[in-house]
Image (cartoon, rainbow, N blue to C red):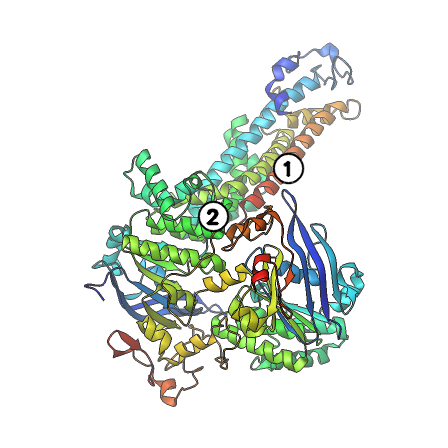
Amino acid sequence: MSNLLEINNLTVQFRGEGGWFTAVDDVSLNLAQGETLGIVGESGSGKSVTALSILRLHASSTTRPTGRILYSGKDMLTMTPRALRAIRGREIAMIFQDPMSSLNPVLTIADQIGETLRIHQQLDARTSRQRAIELLELVRIPDARRRVDEYPHRLSGGMRQRVMIAIAIACQPRLLIADEPTTALDVTIQAQILDLLRDLQSSLGMSVVLISHDMGVIAEFARRVIVMYAGRVVETSGVSELFRKPLHPYTEGLLAAIPKLDIDVDRLPTIKGSIPDPTQAIPGCRYSPRCAIVVPQCRVEAPALLPAGASRFARCPPRVATS
Amino acid sequence: MVAAAILAPMITQYDPVAMRVRLRFRAPQAAFPFGTDQFGRDIFTRVVYGARLSLWIGLSTALLSGLIGALLGVLSAQYRKFDALLMRLMDALMALPAILLAIGLTAVLGPFTSSVIIALSVAYIPRTARIVRASALVTRELEFIEAARVAGASNFRIMRRHLLPNAMGPLLVQSTFVFAYAILAEAALSFLGVGPSPPTPTWGNIIAEGRDHAVYAWWIMLFPGVAISLATLGMNLLGDGLRDTLDPRLKVET
Amino acid sequence: MSAAPVISVQDLVKVFPVRGDRGEKLLLRAVNRVSFEIGDGETLGLVGESGSGKSTIGRLLVGLIPVTSGSVTLFGERIDGKAGEKHISSVRRRVQFVFQDPYGSLNPRMRVDDCIAEPLDIAGGMTRKDRADRIAELLETVGLPRSCADRYPHEFSGGQRQRIGIARALALQPEFIVCDEPVSALDVSMQAQIVNLLLDLQDRFGLSYLFIAHDLAVVRSIAKRVAVMYAGSIIEQGPKGDIYRHPRHPYTRALLDAVPRPDPERERKPALAGEIPSILDPPPGCTFSARCPLATEHCRIEPPIPREVEPGRMVACHLA
C-alpha cells in the first residue's frame, strides 16, 4: 500500500536579519494510512516548521521550502492555491498548541465549526448548526446544545482544545496534524485530550502526526517516532524500540535528562552545552559539540541517516556500526 | 534643512527684515532664488530664517511635551488614584482642538515665540502622556518589576529605572510626530495672526502676508508652503523609521 | 525536621475581589487555609494544576501580595498584617524569589550586571569595586562567564537568562528562596542543568527552597517534602517518597496516573473526568468531590478537614 504522506528531502529556509538560514535540513519521512507518527524535539529542532510546511502555512515571502511533500501522490509544494485550499480542512486538518488564540473571540462556537462545514460541504445554516452539535458531542463536551452558541472566552482551555478538535475532524480528514496539542493544558486535562484523540483516531481511521517536546506524550500516543535536532532527523524508530534502546546519543541523552516520576535520583544526568542557534554553522555532525561519544570523524563529515535494523534509522555512524 | 536653519546668517546675504521697496515683487531669479515680497525682502532669506524659528518651536514643543508627558504618564501608571484624575483632565484637554487651545493660550500669554511653545506643548501633552502611560502599564505587569519589588525597590526606583526607560522607544516615536504637528500648528497660528508678530519671519506669517498678493506674486506663498510640507513629511518619515527599528528590538525574543 | 522551622505558614487565606461577567463583585478565594512548614536547608515542593493557588502562595511568602488572613512567619518574624509590613524589609535580605519566565523576568533595557546587582544597589553601601567583584562572583557561582556582565538579556538563551535570574536572587545571600516554576519554560535538556544548579547551590549555601511546579517529575528530583494543592487548598502533604509511592488522596493518585511516562508499554489508566473547578463558585463540601471516583454524599456536603494520618503526613479526605 502506498504511503498517505511522503516527505522527501524537505529543506526549509527562512529569511532573517542576517540573510537566509536553514530551519529544516533535508528531512524525509513516510506515513501510511491509519498510522500514528510522533515527531519529537526541543526548540529549534524544526519539528513545527516541518508540520506547518505540509500545509504550506508559512509566509511565502520569507520562506523558501525545497524538496517534495507528497500527499496521496500529489506534491503539496507545487500545488495550485485552489487545490491546496480544497485539501486544507477537508483532507488534512491541523490543531495547534494554544487554544486561547486559535479561536476567534468574536464568533460563536457554532459559527467557527460552521465555517469549515460551509466551505467544504456547502451545508446551510441549520444543518451546519446541527452537525456542530453532533461534533461537540463527539469530542465529549457536556451540554453541547447550549455550548454551541457560546463564545470562546466562556470555555476553559481543555474545552477550547476540544472545539479545535471538533473543527478539525468536521470533514473527516484522512490526516490530522497535531502540533503540541496538549502542551498548554493541565496534566489531568491533557490525559483527557490524549484519550479523546486516540479514540477519534481509531473510530475515524485517521492518520495522525503528533508533534511534541514531551517524550512521555510521544511514548503514550505514537507508533513510530522521529527524533529531530537542530533541523535534522537524527533517529527514526518504532516507539517501543526507541525507548527500550535509543540509538542516537541525543535521544539517549534526552531520555536520561528527563526528570523521573517513578524513581529517586541524586542528580539528573545532563547534556552539556545548549541547543545551537539556527544561524550558526557547525562543521560535521550538528550534535558533535555536545555528544558524549564524539570521535574526530564526527566533526569533519556530516553523517547521513543510516539504516540500523527493521525500519530503524540513526544519524550516527559510530553507534550504527556497533549496534 | 536643519543645517540651513542653523547656518542661516552665513548662507544669506540679505537682512530678512530690511525693506527695499524698489525691489518689490521680483519673481524668482538668480539674485533672489525665491523672489521678493511686497516690501522687497528676499523670500529665500525669510524662509531660511523662518526655518530657524519653526524648527526651534517644533523641537521645544516636542521636548517640553515629551518631558512633562513622560512624568505624568509614569505617575499615572503607578498610582491609580492619580491616574483617574489625570486621565479625566487629559480627556478634557484632548476634546479641544489643539489650534483653538493654542490660540486661547497665546491670547493670554502674548504674541511671543515662548507663548507659542508653551501653548502647543500643553495641547500635545495628552498625546505623550498617553503613550508613556500605555507603555508603563504594560511594563508594570512584567515579571522583572516583581523581581525589583522582591529586591526591595521603592515605587520611585521602579518608575525611574524600569518604567521610564522602557517607555523611551514609543515616546521618541511619538515625539517626532509632535514635532511635525507643532510645525504645522505654528504655521496655522502665524497665519491667523497669533504668534510671533511681523516683521519676524515664520513660515506661517510669510504665507499670511503672501495671501493678499497670491495672484501675481505666487512665489511668496509657495516656498514657505513647500518648506512646511517637507519638514512635516521629513519628521513623519523619521518617526515611522524609528518605530520600525525600535519595535522588533524591543520585542521579546523567542 | 531539624530544630525550628525557617518558614511557618498557618491557616493562610488570600481572597481577591474580582468582577464577574455581569459586572457584579465577586470574591476569589485563591488560597484557602493553607498551613505548612519548611525547615532549615529543606525543600518543600508545592505541586498543583492551574487554579490551585500555588503561585499565589509563593508571592504571599515574599510579601509581593498582602495576606488576607492567617500567619506567615519567616525566621521567627511575622510578615502578615499591619504589624508585619514593618518586618518585610528586615527579612527581605534573607528571602528571595526566582521567577518562571526567563524572558520577562529581566529588564530588557538593563545590562546583566545591573540586573544582578539591583538588590545590592537598593540595599546600598557597596563600593564600585566591591560591587563589580560580587557580580563576577555571582556569575561564576551560577556557571556563567564573567564577560556576560556587559551584555544585555536578549543576547542570551532561556537557560542562561534563568541563571542570571538565579544570580540576582543570590545577591543578598538569602537563606530561603521561593522558586516559582523556574524550569517550566525551558527545554528538557536545560531543565536538568538548572535543577542540578539549584541542588548544588542548596548544598553549598545551606538554602531552603519552596519549589513551586506543576511538573511532578521535576518536583521529585528536587524536593524532600511535597504538598499537593487543589482549588486553593493543600489536600495532601508529606515526605516525597510516601507521596509518590503511596498517595492517599484520590486527586494525588489521579494526578500521578495522568502524567505521561516515557514508557510505551505502561498500562494506561482512564483519565480523570471533569474540569478544574472554578474557585469563584466553589461547591459545598470537598472541592474535589465533583470529579472524584470515590465520592460519597458525605463528601459533597461536608468539606474534609486536614488530618495527620502519620507523623509528618497530612491528608484532607474523608476516605483516606
Please name the residue that numbered disc 1 is placed on: B236
* Placement of A121 over or under A290, stated as above or below: below
Image quarter hosting the N terminus of chain B = top right
Whichever of labels 2 and 1 marks the residue nearer the N terminus, that label is 2
Q: What is the x, y in percent for residue B115? A: 52, 29
Residue at 62 percent across and 81 percent down: it is A138
Residue B181 occupies which quadrant of the picture?
top right
Amino acid type assigned to the residue bearing label 2 in the image: Ala
Apparent side of residue C223 relative to residue B207 in the rendered image (left or right): left
Q: CA distance from mark 2 to mark 1?
A: 24 Å
On the same chain: label 2 and label 1?
A: yes
* Placement of A142 over or under B231, stated as above or below: below
Tell me the element at label 1: helix
Tell me the element at label 2: helix
Name the mark on residue B136.
Answer: 2
Q: Depth check: C286 or A26 in front?
A: A26
Name the residue at the left extreme: C3
Instruction: Identify the subunit bearing mark 1.
Output: B
Q: What is the x, y in percent for residue C25? A: 42, 68
Q: Depth check: A99 or B31 in front?
A: A99
* Placement of C60 over or under A281, stated as above or below: below
Q: Depth check: A172 or B116 in front?
A: A172
Q: What is the x, y in percent for residue C158? A: 48, 52
